[in-house]
Amino acid sequence: MVANLRNNAFLSSFMFLFLIGSSHAITSSEMSTICDKTLDPSFCLDFLNSEFSSPNLEALAKATLDATQAKATQTFNRLQSIIDGGVDPRSKLAYRSCLDEYENTIGNLEEAFEHLASGEGEGLKTKVSAALDGADTCLDYVKRLRSVDDSVLNNSKGIKNLCGITLVISNILPRRY
């Protein structure tokens, strides 16, 4: 009898969560609306269409933050490798400055996850904006170099685009955000 009650409670909880999650599903039309508000709509659509199948907005924001965090960590590691590998003093200074920016960017993204989980929309926006600024500042540092590592350049641009997607989503999340 107790096992039956547990099963019923589990099924009821599961159905409730399923209905809540599915009732806020995002359509491809809504994805297009999100992407139209970003700096690079084609990047956004390619990213969302390849990664997701109509998630809810919170799940979409989390998945976008996950991708941003992965790119930021990859870029941080690449910068460390470039510096450790030996480059000319001017390049080393630029890459070291980028490394510092990415250390802050990763920290800001970690805090953005916390704000998303707790429903603090303004905190989410602030931390994602700071992460975007870090990638943008890195681009400013390296664009002055004669030769720029392609992965640092491309990842920094990708991070800016991913942060832009997250910022648009954060502006349309339900009010608890």
Image (cartoon, rainbow, N blue to C red):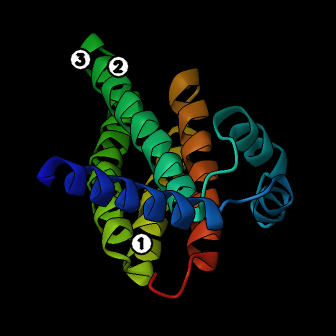
Marks 1/3: CA distance? 34 Å
Residue occupied by mark 3: 84
- Circle 2: element type: helix
Q: Residues within 10 Å of mark 2 (few under 14, many from 20)?
A: some
Q: Quadrant of residue 112?
A: bottom left
Q: Which mark is residue 82?
A: 2
Q: Residue at x 38, y 77 (%)?
A: 119
- Circle 1: element type: helix
- Circle 3: element type: helix
Q: Quadrant of residue 80?
A: top left
- In the displayed structure image, the side of residue 163 where residue 92 appears, left or right: left
The earlier-in-sequence mark between 2 and 1 is 2
What is the x, y in percent for residue 2?
12, 54
What is the x, y in percent for residue 140?
54, 50
What is the x, y in percent for residue 115?
33, 71
Q: Are marks 1 and 3 in contact (CB under 8 Å)?
A: no
Q: Residues within 10 Å of mark 1 (few under 14, many from 20)?
A: many
Does residue 3 show up?
Answer: yes
Of the residues tagged 1 and 3, which is closer to the observer? 1
- In the displayed structure image, the side of residue 129 where residue 120 appears, left or right: left
- In the displayed structure image, the side of residue 90 where residue 39 appears, left or right: right
What is the x, y in percent for residue 75?
41, 31
Residue occupied by mark 1: 124
Q: Nearer the viewer, residue 65 or 58?
A: 58
The residue positioned farthest toward the bottom in the image shown: 175
